[in-house]
Image (tube, rainbow, N blue to C red):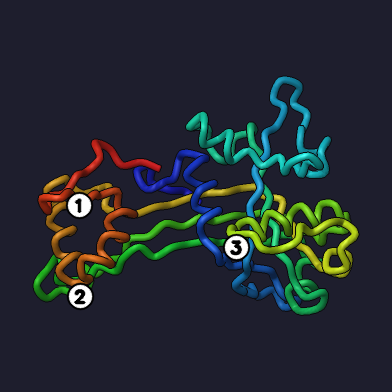
């Protein structure tokens, strides 16, 4: 996917945050007739650091990047250092995990053809055409963020890996806790089908008005508030990196990049 630089998500921590926040992704497999099958899935994302000094894959030493002591996902490290490394850099390895019924078309598809696609997106706000032109419908637009992944899918057979992945999924979807930690000996793990996508390419795109001038962004912000209401607009403008000040004015960042 070739993206215009200003619309491309460049920071790995932005991709990590987005994949941690969004709950539903879409898995695309190829059926026996060559058609794509796309279905929504809950998922969890792992990112691990590769040992670039020796060019050996650290993840391969720790069960595909899942360390027994703590999942080797480096989200905290990535965020702490505010790294600018590209997500497709040789420095990092990405994996997507999801659980599934043990039978079904998607399982048959990925066993026959490991190549899959995975997409995650968030619609930030629909912008009606009259924001930009009094009568031309073609001016309607949408602000959004999306991640597109290509890779190869496998059925996980190691119960330790399955347990670690599902525990991280519980942390994502049920952060308040109130559940027992899953172990490799848990029946629910032993009999659970877990899919792992070994990511070969990951690209992010965002459109939040970064191509507009500051004055035009403020003009659109006022129109969003008028159409959507103050409460809903706060979340929309937050995603647009616009803060509403106490005096009703807007605070905009000097530059917009993710």
61 w.r.t. 168: above or below: above
* Residue that sits furthest to the front in the current view: 178
The disc, 2 or 1, on the residue closer to the chain's N-terminal end is 2
Q: Which mark is residue 183?
A: none
Question: Few, some or many C-alpha atoms within 10 Å of disc 1 (few <14, some 14-19, many ≥20)?
Answer: some
Residue designated by label 1: 244
The disc, 2 or 3, on the residue closer to the chain's N-terminal end is 2
Residue designated by label 2: 137
Q: Nearer the viewer, mark 2 or mark 3?
A: 3
Q: Quadrant of residue 6?
A: top left
Q: Residue at x 51, y 60 (%)?
A: 22
Question: Few, some or many C-alpha atoms within 10 Å of disc 3 (few <14, some 14-19, many ≥20)?
Answer: some
Q: Nearest the camera: 157 or 55?
A: 157
**Residue 136 x %, y %:** 15, 73
Q: Residue at x 69, y 73 (%)?
A: 34
12 w.r.t. 143: above or below: above
Q: Secondary structure at mark 2?
A: helix
Residue designated by label 3: 173
Q: Nearest the camera: 70 or 96?
A: 70
Q: CA distance from mark 2 to mark 1?
A: 29 Å
Q: Residue at x 57, y 38 (%)?
A: 76
**Residue 193 x %, y %:** 81, 67
Q: Quadrant of residue 225?
A: bottom left
Q: Secondary structure at mark 1?
A: strand
72 w.r.t. 37: above or below: above
**Residue 46 x %, y %:** 66, 48
């Amino acid at each position: 996917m070739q993206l215009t630089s200003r619309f491309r998500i460049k920071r790995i921590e932005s991709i990590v945050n987005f994949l941690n926040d969004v709950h539903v992704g879409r898995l695309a497999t190829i059926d026996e007739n060559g058609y794509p099958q796309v279905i929504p899935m809950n998922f969890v994302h792992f990112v691990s650091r590769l040992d670039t000094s020796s060019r050996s894959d650290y993840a391969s030493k720790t069960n595909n990047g899942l360390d027994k002591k703590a999942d080797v996902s480096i989200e905290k490290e990535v965020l702490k250092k505010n790294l600018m490394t590209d997500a497709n850099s040789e420095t990092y390895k990405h994996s997507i995990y999801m659980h599934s019924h043990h039978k079904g078309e998607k399982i048959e598809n990925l066993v026959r053809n490991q190549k899959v696609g995975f997409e995650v997106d968030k619609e930030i706000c629909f912008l009606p055409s009259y924001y930009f032109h009094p009568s031309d419908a073609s001016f309607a637009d949408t602000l959004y963020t999306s991640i597109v992944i290509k890779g190869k899918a496998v059925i996980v057979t190691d119960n330790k890996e399955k347990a670690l992945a599902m525990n991280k999924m519980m942390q994502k979807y049920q952060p308040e806790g109130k559940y027992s930690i899953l172990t490799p000996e848990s029946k629910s793990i032993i009999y659970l089908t877990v899919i792992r996508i070994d990511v070969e390419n990951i690209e992010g795109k965002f459109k939040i008005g970064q191509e507009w001038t500051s004055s035009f962004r403020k003009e659109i912000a006022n129109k969003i508030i008028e159409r959507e209401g103050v409460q809903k607009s706060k979340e929309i403008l937050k995603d647009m990196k616009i803060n509403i000040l106490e005096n009703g004015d807007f605070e905009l960042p000097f530059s917009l990049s993710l």
